[in-house]
Image (cartoon, rainbow, N blue to C red):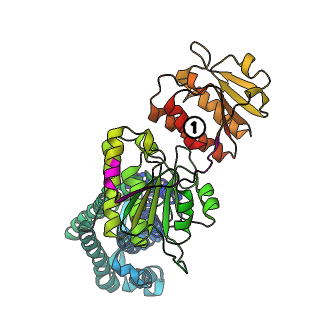
């Protein structure tokens, strides 16, 4: 039976890798810690099984005992994960709940690892011959195992199922269903296997351990694919909350800026800001640390891809309102989101957010500077969703500048031009974007973008001369997404994008004006 060690060894490696991905994929939030604990104790369980079947004698006995450390803690980790995800259970409002629930498994672990007392967990050990004169040891269950560990474990699992069923009645979004389904599958599979073991305890290898490999790997993989717990949504309590024009339980569409209003809201009420601007810029402008999602293709702290609507973005919004009823969610960049998603997905996303805001008595503000770039029909549908529409005039500078100066006068720059660089920027490093050349308009999101990104990393500014000639045939949304990406790269590098030359396309003028 020496082959037993192989599936456990592979499973241990898989669990360790995926749990590491899950843990490092987000900061130290409560939910993530319990999910990571689940992966850790499952890893202890399965790794111990691996060495138990690989070795023999007293060494195998040590790993046999260590396995029960993982077994004792696994139901606790499962229950704590369920109590904190996706809807934080009322049981967790009592701050000592995690400690109280931890006491029974710690008692079990004490009797497993303390030799003079382990007869209370195992009344004895029997020898199992494995060939070549070698033996392994197996324990016979004692009173602590029968009357503490087993009842407590099934109490945790039954309570987990009960909480999951109750959560189903409260779910609002696709990500909530996604999390509940992931948890349900991860719990039910080992439970079924364990029931089989209780019926026939002579089954080898233990199907509970093998199915645990599946569950831990499945859970860690599915959750590590998304930044489900990436953005901290807690907000320090504010001493004074002055009266604002923005009220809770209402949805506002604000045209022509609004960042001064953002600053006012963030300094008076718990607020979550979802913006095309970086976290550092927002917090510097606001003057305090506030929860921020940066909508960007650039990989940076607290950045999320704009196509992650139902998962990272919507889940973070829901979590914010769960923790901060009557708080304000401020969204800027709906057209940027539209560039990566269908119209139906965008409209459904807005509807979900507005519906959930009313359930938590929260306020929702959409900054609509870029809505003018959308098709008239889509813009009208978005406007119809909001309780109030208003116009504020307080534009703020981004990272793109449009100037009339010659590109050759700009120092420490890379000139990207659709005209002969020997004429327009002879004194600086340049890239000539033209049909049939080394860099063509078709490579704007590939080779040209690569050169721009490297120049920004090296501290250079980027001059885009006669940009219109490089983006002939581009649709408005594609152009906006590209310019937004350049602005984000410049902001991350603390540099600038400078536009020179002709701009006659109306949508291009609007985009440059919006980002300037």
Residue at the top extreme of this rendering: 436
**Quarter of image, res 88:** bottom left
Q: Residue at x 63, y 48 (%)?
A: 397
Q: Nearer the viewer, residue 92 or 374?
A: 374
Where is residue 163? Give x, y as percent. 28, 73
Q: Is residue 186 above or below residue 442?
A: below
Whether 385 is among the magenta residues is: yes
Q: Which residue is mark 1?
A: 512
* Residue 329 position within the rendered picture, expressed as x and y whole percent measured from the top left: 44, 62
In the image, taking residue 171 as reference, residue 460 lies left or right, namely right
Which residue sits at x=44%, y=57%? 54
**Secondary structure at numbered mark 1:** helix
Q: Residue at 53% across / 38% down in the picture?
A: 511
Left or right: residue 232 versus residue 77 is: right
Q: Nearer the viewer, residue 214 or 325?
A: 325
Q: Residue 78: where, in percent of width, then height?
A: 36, 69
Q: Which residues are magenta?
A: 382-400
Residue in front for this viewpoint, 216 or 364: 364
Which quadrant would residue 386 be assigned to in this image? bottom left
Q: Would residue 37 be visible to someone looking at this image?
A: yes
- Where's the C terminus, which quadrant? top right
Q: Considering the image in quadrants, where does the N terminus appear?
A: bottom left
Q: Is residue 133 visible?
A: no
State the image coordinates of residue 243 (x, y, percent, origin top left).
48, 75
Q: Is residue 23 above or below residue 478?
A: below
- Badge count: 1
Crowdedness of circle 1 by 10 Å Cα count: few (<14), some, many (20+)?
some
Check residue 90 for magenta coloring.
no
- Residue at coordinates 54% horizontally, 75% vertically from top-left? 236
Seen in the image, is 408 located left or right of residue 302?
right
């Amino acid at each position: 039976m020496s082959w037993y060690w192989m599936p456990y060894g592979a499973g241990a490696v898989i669990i360790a890798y995926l749990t590491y991905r899950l843990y490092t994929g987000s900061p130290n939030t409560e939910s993530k810690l319990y999910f990571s604990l689940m992966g850790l104790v499952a890893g202890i369980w399965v790794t111990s099984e691996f060495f138990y079947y690989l070795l023999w004698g007293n060494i195998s006995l040590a790993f046999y005992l260590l396995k029960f450390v993982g077994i004792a803690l696994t139901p606790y980790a499962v229950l704590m994960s369920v109590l904190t995800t996706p809807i934080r259970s009322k049981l967790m409002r009592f701050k000592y709940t995690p400690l109280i629930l931890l006491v029974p498994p710690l008692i079990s672990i004490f009797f497993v690892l303390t030799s003079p007392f382990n007869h209370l967990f195992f009344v004895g050990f029997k020898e199992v011959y494995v060939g070549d004169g070698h033996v392994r040891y197996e324990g016979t269950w004692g009173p602590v195992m029968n009357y503490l560990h087993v009842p407590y474990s099934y109490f945790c699992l039954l309570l987990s199922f009960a909480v999951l069923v109750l959560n189903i009645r409260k779910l609002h979004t696709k990500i909530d269903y996604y999390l509940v389904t992931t948890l349900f599958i991860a719990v039910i599979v080992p439970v079924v296997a364990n029931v089989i073991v209780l019926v026939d305890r002579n089954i080898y290898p233990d199907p509970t351990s093998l199915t645990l490999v599946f569950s831990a790997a499945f859970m860690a993989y599915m959750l590590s694919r998304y930044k489900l717990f990436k953005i901290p949504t807690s907000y320090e309590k504010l001493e004074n909350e002055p009266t604002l024009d923005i009220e809770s339980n209402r949805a506002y569409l604000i045209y022509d800026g609004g960042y001064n209003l953002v600053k006012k809201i963030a300094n008076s009420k718990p607020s979550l800001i979802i913006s095309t601007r970086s976290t550092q810029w927002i917090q510097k402008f606001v003057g305090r640390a506030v929860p921020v999602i940066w909508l960007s293709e650039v990989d940076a702290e607290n950045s999320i891809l704009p196509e992650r609507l139902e998962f990272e973005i919507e889940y973070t919004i829901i979590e914010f309102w769960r923790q901060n009823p009557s708080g304000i969610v401020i969204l800027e960049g709906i057209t940027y989101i539209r560039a990566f998603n269908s119209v139906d997905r965008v409209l459904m996303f807005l509807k979900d957010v507005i519906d959930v805001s009313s359930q938590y008595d929260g306020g929702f503000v959409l900054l609509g500077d870029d809505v003018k770039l959308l098709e008239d029909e889509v813009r009208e549908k978005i406007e119809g969703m909001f309780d109030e529409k208003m116009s504020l005039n307080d534009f703020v500078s981004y990272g793109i500048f449009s100037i009339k100066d010659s590109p050759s006068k700009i120092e420490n720059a890379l000139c990207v031009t659709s005209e002969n660089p020997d004429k327009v920027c002879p004194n600086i490093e340049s890239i000539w974007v033209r049909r049939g050349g080394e860099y063509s308009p078709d490579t704007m999101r590939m080779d040209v973008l690569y050169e721009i990104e490297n120049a920004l990393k090296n501290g250079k500014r980027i001059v885009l001369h006669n940009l219109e000639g490089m983006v002939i045939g581009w649709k408005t949304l594609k152009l906006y997404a590209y310019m937004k990406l350049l602005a984000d790269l410049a902001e991350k590098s603390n540099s600038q994008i400078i536009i020179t030359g002709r701009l006659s396309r109306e949508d291009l003028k609007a985009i440059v004006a919006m980002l300037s």
